[in-house]
Image (spheres, rainbow, N blue to C red):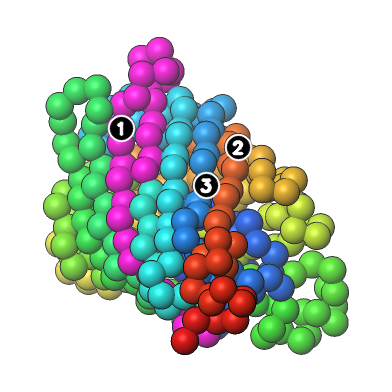
């Protein structure tokens, strides 16, 4: 937790606002230099232990499986990127296989030096029955700190273990039933985030953690956090493939109430095709197009 209390406010839930460690190493800046034509990842996971994490927005069922597709394209270098996340969950109390929830996210994001911004719309809906739909649109501004560029003291003490941290704040300027606590009470207004990746061995073994907090627009103090979601995970990588085990817990902060938690194992495969790979944006002789 000391990683999340670092006084420098860093970037937020990775470049795209998702609690997954980057597949690139801390010293790799090639993606920012090259425009992505299309890229992303495929993810599938099993909630190996799940006493309370719900399988639908109305808090019914228990998640058994998770499947996700992330797609992105750079519209203008790293300054303007469009991405979408499509998340699907199944209910272990209903046979494990049949999908019970679909969360769709669509966003624009950009990176400038240590800072990033994001405009995002998300809609969470049940798939196997009618029921509650949660939707919101938010803006997020974050900042980033990397040991390779910003922390000489860290490089001296831990020359082989790079650290990346980011954090920031956001505003849910549109909110249709997106709640401020795990028990579906209140309506979220502000979001505070922090994330850290610790490279234990050559970007092949990565320890990561994530914190996500919401405030309640219906509370007397709208800036006070009412929910804390935290994740701790360990990722093992080989080329473009990642196997991770992680624990998540979502809990209220301002009152007693429902706590949702689980332990999951997931497999992620990433892909990326840059415009330079296909010769887009260059002249026939290989020089950049004017």
225 vs 135, nearest the viewer: 135
Q: Secondary structure at mark 2?
A: strand
290 vs 172, nearest the viewer: 290
Q: Nearer the viewer, mark 1 or mark 3?
A: 3
Q: Residues within 10 Å of mark 2 (few under 14, many from 20)?
A: some
Query: Looking at the picture, does residue 100 appear above or below residue 133?
Result: above
Where in the figure is residue 24, as x and y percent of width and height?
65, 62
Where in the figure is residue 229, as x and y percent of width and height?
43, 53
Where in the figure is residue 264, as x and y percent of width and height?
56, 35
Q: Which residue position holds label 1? A: 101
Q: Residues within 10 Å of mark 1 (few under 14, many from 20)?
A: many
The image's mark for residue 267 is 2
Q: Pointers 2 and 3 in contact (CB under 8 A)?
A: no
Where in the figure is residue 271, as x and y percent of width and height?
57, 50
Among numbered discs 2 and 3, the one appearing first in the sequence: 3
Query: Looking at the picture, does residue 151 appear above or below residue 174?
Result: below
Helix, strand or loop for the magenta stretch, by majority:
strand
Q: How many marks?
A: 3
Q: CA distance from mark 1 to mark 2?
A: 20 Å
Q: Which residue position holds label 3? A: 41
Q: Nearer the viewer, mark 2 or mark 3?
A: 3
Figure quadrant of the N terminus: bottom right
Q: CA distance from mark 1 to mark 3?
A: 20 Å
Residue 126 quadrant: top left
Q: Nearer the viewer, mark 1 or mark 2?
A: 2
Taking the spot 36% from the left edge, 63% from the top edge, the residue there is: 82
- The span shown in magenta is 86-114
Q: Secondary structure at mark 3?
A: strand
């Amino acid at each position: 937790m000391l990683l999340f209390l670092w006084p420098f406010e860093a970037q937020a839930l990775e470049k795209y606002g998702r609690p997954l460690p980057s597949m690139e190493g801390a010293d790799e800046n090639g993606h920012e230099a090259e425009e992505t034509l299309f890229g992303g990842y495929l993810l599938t996971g099993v909630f190996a232990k799940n006493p309370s994490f719900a399988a639908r927005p109305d808090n019914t069922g228990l998640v058994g499986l998770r499947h996700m597709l992330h797609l992105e394209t750079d519209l203008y270098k790293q300054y303007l990127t469009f991405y979408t996340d499509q998340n699907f969950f199944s209910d272990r109390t209903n046979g494990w296989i049949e999908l019970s929830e679909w969360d769709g996210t669509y966003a624009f994001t950009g990176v400038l030096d240590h800072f990033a911004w994001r405009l995002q719309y998300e809609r969470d809906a049940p798939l196997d029955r009618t029921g509650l739909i949660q939707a919101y649109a938010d803006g997020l501004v974050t900042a980033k700190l990397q040991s390779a560029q910003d922390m000489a003291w860290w490089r001296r003490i831990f020359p082989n273990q790079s650290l990346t941290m980011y954090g920031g704040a956001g505003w849910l300027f549109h909110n249709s039933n997106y709640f401020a606590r795990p028990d579906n009470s209140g309506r979220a207004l502000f979001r505070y985030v922090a994330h850290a990746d610790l490279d234990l061995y050559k970007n092949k073994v990565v320890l990561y953690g994530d914190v996500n907090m919401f405030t309640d627009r219906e509370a007397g103090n709208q800036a006070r956090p009412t929910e804390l979601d935290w994740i701790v995970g360990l990722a093992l990588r080989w080329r473009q493939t990642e196997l991770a085990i992680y624990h998540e817990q979502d809990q209220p902060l301002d009152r007693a109430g429902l706590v949702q938690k689980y332990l999951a194992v997931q497999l992620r495969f990433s892909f990326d095709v840059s415009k330079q790979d296909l010769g887009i944006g260059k002249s026939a002789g290989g020089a950049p197009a004017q």
